[in-house]
Amino acid sequence: MATSTPSTALTHKTAEDSPTQVFLNTPPAVLHLLGYSAPFIRTLTPIAQALTWSSPNPWLPWLILASWWFLCLIGDTIVKYGLNASLLLLLGIGYLSKPAKPAAVDLSMSPERLQLLLEETRQFNRAIQNLIQTYYIPLRNLYVWKNAQQSRLAITYLLTCSPAYLILTHYFGGTIWTMIQVLLIPLPLPQ
């Protein structure tokens, strides 16, 4: 009669579930998926740890909770009163910052793959350029310092309209949002 001791049963179970055995028993498609998604998993792991309160840093979940409370309690105030200030801050940062130097690119791939990548990039670039020409450039021209007269006009507009915007938002903010909701959200028709 053979009896097994707890140590042999534990050793047998450990040898069966070793990382090598798990790796060998995993289908190749799953390994490819895990290999390709490794950067995303590596990025999302600290976020998931913080949200599930299992982070190695014990203060991180508390900071996330406090920032959530902050956002819920005074988020509407930030949106109402901080929008113009943030636009002015962005304009100031754009004025004071210098253009960034392009980073060096290391392309070590086959010529066929490079050609395919370049063609896909050209097609994507054409689509983006159409969107930029249509929507982004007319708005950007107001807020960049290439044309100083237009940028000064935009800053003057923001500085002169901000007090009126703040007063109207403070005293009539709820009424304005209610009117917008009534006008923009269609009411269900009776059946």
Image: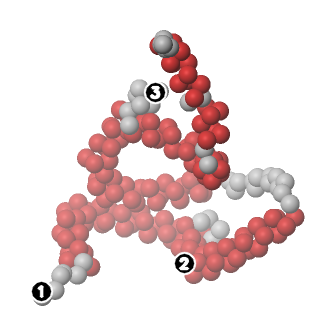
Q: Are marks 3 and 1 in contact (CB under 8 Å)?
A: no
Q: CA distance from mark 1 to mark 2?
A: 39 Å
Query: Disc 1 or 2, which lies upstream in sequence?
Result: 2
Q: Residue at x 33, y 53 (%)?
A: 78
Task: Indicate the amino acid at tag 2.
Answer: Tyr
Compared with 14, 2 (above or below) is above
Q: Are marks 3 and 2 in contact (CB under 8 Å)?
A: no
Tell me the mark number nearer the camera, choosing from 1 and 2. 1
User: In the visual, does 161 lie left or right of 13?
Assistant: left
Q: CA distance from mark 3 to mark 2?
A: 44 Å
Spot occupied by residue 49 in the image (x, y as percentages of width and height): 44, 36
Q: Quadrant of the C terminus?
A: bottom left
Task: Indicate the amino acid at tag 1.
Answer: Pro
Q: Residues within 10 Å of mark 2 (few under 14, many from 20)?
A: few
Q: CA distance from mark 3 to mark 1?
A: 55 Å
Q: Residue at x 76, y 55 (%)?
A: 102
Please tell me whether mark 3 sits on a helix, a strand or a loop.
loop
Query: Disc 3 or 1, which lies upstream in sequence?
Result: 3
Compared with 85, 174 (above or below) is below
Q: Which residue is mark 2?
A: 135
Q: Which residue is mark 3?
A: 57
Residue found at the far front of this picture:
1
Q: Quadrant of residue 113?
A: bottom right
Please tell me whether mark 2 sits on a helix, a strand or a loop.
helix
Spot occupied by residue 70 in the image (x, y as percentages of width and height): 31, 43
Q: Which residue is mark 1?
A: 190
Q: Residues within 10 Å of mark 1 (few under 14, many from 20)?
A: few
